[in-house]
Image (tube, helix red, strand yellow):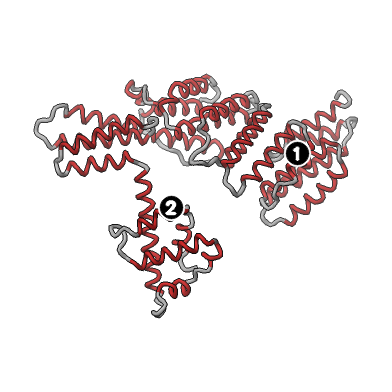
Amino acid sequence: MFSDKLLSLLQTFSKYDLNRFRKFLLSPYFNDQEDVTRLFELVNEAIRSGDAAVAALEKAVVWKALFPKQPFDDAQLRRLASDLTRLAQRFLIEELRQLDPLTEALDLQKALEKYDLQKHLAGAERQIEKLLDKSQGKSTDYYFVQFRQHWNIFNRASKMVATAGYTDKLVTADFYLECFYLAQKLKLYIAWLLYRGFRVTEREVPVVPGFWDYLEDDRFREVPLIRIYRTVIISFTESENEAHFENLLQILDDFADELTQADLRECFYIAQNYCALKINQGKTAYYYRYFGLIKKMVDLDILVEDGQLPEAVFKNFITVSLGAGEYDWTERFIQHYAGYLPASIRENARLFNLAYVYFYKKNYEKVIEHLRDVEYSDVVYALGAKSMLLRTYYEQGEYLALDSLMDSFRIFLRRNKVIAKNLKREYINFLNLVKKLTTITASDKKAIAELRQRVSATSYSMPKNWLLKKIAEIEGETGG
């Protein structure tokens, strides 16, 4: 392969992107090198033909296609590849700018000021106001745009001897800059708080003395993100006082219409983190609070971003919804939202998670039916499917099938080179615990107590609650 940097970039382009990039390269304003355009045509054809054609683009092959009568020149070929890569990156910037008309309008405002074109400036500033009025929600970017707009106006006013409202223009620019800074600072602080919740770290995000008191200034009471983020921080730093969380949910509800979809989505995820914290503390009622937040996100239609739903979010929502006992809702959620998962794992995720729902519903025949079609080439789904199938056979009392599966599961763990050693140990321990379940009797109180102790010492990456429930059922056989 002659230029991994170039090819890896262009292979991320959709057919639509490749077509637009071709038009970009044909513009002499951006590119006046015919050889660079010819190189793109060669690479473009290979990408559209498939991975094998791309892999065949060796240096000698590319050079001969471009310059059949000239001796090979590695330096020239590398320069052409470098120039095409640079132009592809410039294209991405231009495409991004077209998606951000506000930034373009602000740049135009600044450019027109140089020439003192008052009528043009007035039109540009009306366009900025129109775009701001149409903007969906007050994100940190919204405040930064407001600052830039008013800073441009202030700069223009500062060059005039007598300008009406000079101070007002300065104070307005300062206010929007503060809103941008404070909201962004709080966002970073929350990221640190959440990270600290599951990782040990000696680093922290510092704040200047008086910072928290300054946030209470009346000027910021109606700035949505500052109010929300401040309440988030109080909710997590004083998590034992659950009234703060109730206040957070109320403020989120009050300001929902003033946030962008991205900010609202992120705020819901943060609130769900609080619920997860409480669930981990043993407060299982928060499964229902968590589910309520999931349902609200679905009702608000803010789950999908750019046509995609992250697999981790999909799986987490299913686990929580099943924990809340919402089996039918979860099944509908899977059928609808699986289509937004990355194509490479979409079908596996749909089949596996539907099987998970049927396991909770105790419809074991459907569990087996769905797991039969899960592709075991994905180690994560292979482990999950085998673990669920193992529990299904136990629930059905199919002990011969269970023993056979446990034997094949051990061989799978032993032979697989991808699974981490510590995870292998956990699964082998799980197999041993299930084996013990099949041999223990209700009358053997000592063995039951020992098994419960062993299960309690396992991590929650294994089906710990299921094991404890099965032990309790064995005890119940004699009323123990």
Q: Position of residue 223 (x, y in %)?
A: 37, 26
Residue sitting nearer the eye, 354 or 46: 46
Q: In percent of the image, x 32 and y 36: which residue is there?
A: 144
Is 93 rendered above or below residue 45? above
Q: Are dots 2 and 1 in contact, CB under 8 Å?
A: no
Amino acid at pointer 1: Val
The residue tagged with tag 1: helix, strand or loop? helix
Q: Quadrant of residue 62?
A: bottom left
Q: Tell which circle, 2 or 1, labels the residue nearer the N-terminal end.
A: 2
Q: Which residue is mark 2?
A: 17
Q: Position of residue 226 (x, y in %)?
A: 39, 28
Q: How many marks?
A: 2
Does residue 45 appear left or right of residue 141 in this picture? Answer: right
Does residue 38 appear left or right of residue 343 in this picture? Answer: left
Q: What is the crowding at mark 1: few (fewer than 14 residues within 10 Å), some, or many (at least 20)?
A: many
Q: Which mark, by number, is residue 367?
A: 1
Amino acid at pointer 2: Asp
Is 449 rendered above or below residue 48? above
Residue sitting nearer the eye, 286 or 89: 89
The residue tagged with tag 2: helix, strand or loop? helix
Placement of the C terminus among the 4 image quadrants: top right
Q: In percent of the image, x 70 and y 34: which residue is there?
A: 357
Q: Position of residue 280 (x, y in %)?
A: 63, 31
Q: Position of residue 402 (x, y in %)?
A: 83, 43
Q: In percent of the image, x 78 and y 39: which residue is there?
A: 391
Q: Quadrant of residue 176?
A: top left
Is 469 rendered above or below residue 59? above
Q: Quadrant of residue 99?
A: top left
Q: Which mark, by number, is residue 141?
A: none
Does residue 359 appear left or right of residue 447 in this picture? Answer: left
